């Protein structure tokens, strides 16, 4: 009884101090439409677009991915982090930005959460590690919503929270992403696998990722380890290879300047080189290859997203 009275007193003050007009009604909010929005990116974007006026504490835009875009670039332009992009797009299929794809972009750090049937304000607050009262205040909730509950489908904004709801592919990236730091902030232009040779046009196996960056961009070690090679190596031009303590081995190719020597121990994110276009290269970029326990793997699966 004490807890209920205390909550009632809190919300009575909320209604007096912060009364607001009801958000616009949107027809067709069903369990099926909400579930579709949480599992399909196009449906989620349409869902948020129709209800964005009801959000409190954040403004959102719908960004259409352009050629050469990546989600880190989109986040930076909005003054937020990749966490805010993931937290505002729970149906995002992966972290590779596809030209023409639409994403919800908030102008504040945090997550947009669509309340599902069976969820309560208290359970959502507990999920994100915030106080229910603070969450209610930030989202302009009314006294009626205290007593009768918040309607399923309601959009809530949890400021400064990290994502809790995401697709399995993105969740896997979060689980694995702390293993290796990104060697630099660049745009992916090529991935591991078969591709056309940029010089001959013939089919060619590419053993890593290419990140387009200006000449002379600083390159950092992906993890603690020991430099096993530092010098010229065929098509890689100037390159560095590092054996790490966690079973990984990394290679950094087409460098303009090498700042470490063979046998040297390096730390995670320690600056080891500057990017360039040495060796068999069509322009300034970093070639980054990764082996795990001796097996060549796709680097983007293990690179930190933060």
Image (spheres, rainbow, N blue to C red):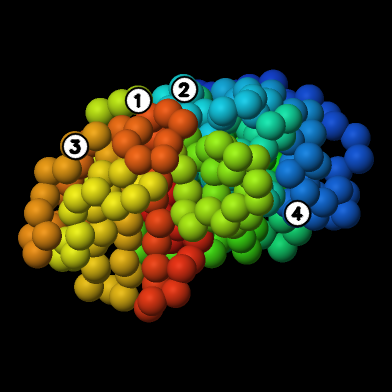
| Secondary structure of the residue carrying numbered label 4 | helix
| Secondary structure of the residue carrying numbered label 1 | loop
State the residue at coordinates (31%, 33%): 276
Q: 106 or 57: which is nearer to us?
A: 106
Q: Position of residue 200 (x, y in %)?
A: 60, 40
Q: 236 or 26: which is nearer to us?
A: 236
Q: Position of residue 29 (x, y in %)?
A: 86, 43
Label 2: few (<14), some (14–19) or many (≥20) C-alpha neighbours in 10 Å = few
Label 3: few (<14), some (14–19) or many (≥20) C-alpha neighbours in 10 Å = some
| Residue 292 visible from this viewpoint | yes
CA gap, disc 3 and disc 1: 13 Å
Q: Nearer the viewer, mark 1 or mark 2?
A: 1
Find disc 3 in the rendering and name its residue: 257
**Quick one: which residue is furthest to the bottom in this view?**
293
Q: What numbered label is drawn on residue 39?
A: 4
CA gap, disc 4 and disc 2: 26 Å
Label 4: few (<14), some (14–19) or many (≥20) C-alpha neighbours in 10 Å = some
Q: Position of residue 249 (x, y in %)?
A: 31, 66
Q: Nearer the viewer, mark 3 or mark 4?
A: 3
Q: 186 or 31: which is nearer to us?
A: 186
CA gap, disc 2 and disc 3: 30 Å
Find disc 2 in the rendering and name its residue: 77
State the residue at coordinates (44%, 65%): 176
Label 3 close to label 1 by CB (< 8 Å) = no
Find disc 1 in the rendering and name its residue: 214
Nearest to N terminus: mark 4 or mark 1: 4
Q: Position of residue 122 (x, y in %)?
A: 54, 57
């Amino acid at each position: 009884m004490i807890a209920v009275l205390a909550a009632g007193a809190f919300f009575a003050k909320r209604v007096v101090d912060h009364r607001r007009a009801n958000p616009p009604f949107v027809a067709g909010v069903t369990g099926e439409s909400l579930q579709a929005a949480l599992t399909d990116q196009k449906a989620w974007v349409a869902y948020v677009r129709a209800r964005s006026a009801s959000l409190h504490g954040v403004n959102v835009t719908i960004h259409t991915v352009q050629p050469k875009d990546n989600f880190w670039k989109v986040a930076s332009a909005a003054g937020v982090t990749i966490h805010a992009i993931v937290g505002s797009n729970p149906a995002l299929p992966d972290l590779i930005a596809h030209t023409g794809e639409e994403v919800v972009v908030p102008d504040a750090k945090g997550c947009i959460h669509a309340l599902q049937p069976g969820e309560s304000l208290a359970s959502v607050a507990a999920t994100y590690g915030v106080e229910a009262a603070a969450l209610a205040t930030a989202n302009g909730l009314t006294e009626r919503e205290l007593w009768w509950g918040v309607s399923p489908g309601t959009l809530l904004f949890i400021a400064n929270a990290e994502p809790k709801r995401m697709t399995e592919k993105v969740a896997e990236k979060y689980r694995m992403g702390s293993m290796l730091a990104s060697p630099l902030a660049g745009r992916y232009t090529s991935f591991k696998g078969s591709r056309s040779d940029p010089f001959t046009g013939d089919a060619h196996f590419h053993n890593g990722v290419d990140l387009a960056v200006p000449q002379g961009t600083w390159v950092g070690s992906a993890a603690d380890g020991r430099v096993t090679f530092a010098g010229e190596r065929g098509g890689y031009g100037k390159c560095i290879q590092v054996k790490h303590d966690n079973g990984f081995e990394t290679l950094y190719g087409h460098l303009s300047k090498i700042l470490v020597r063979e046998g040297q121990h390096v730390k995670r994110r320690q600056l080891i080189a500057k990017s360039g276009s040495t060796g068999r290269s069509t322009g300034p970029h970093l070639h980054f290859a990764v082996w795990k326990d001796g097996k060549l793997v796709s680097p983007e699966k293990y690179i930190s997203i933060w």
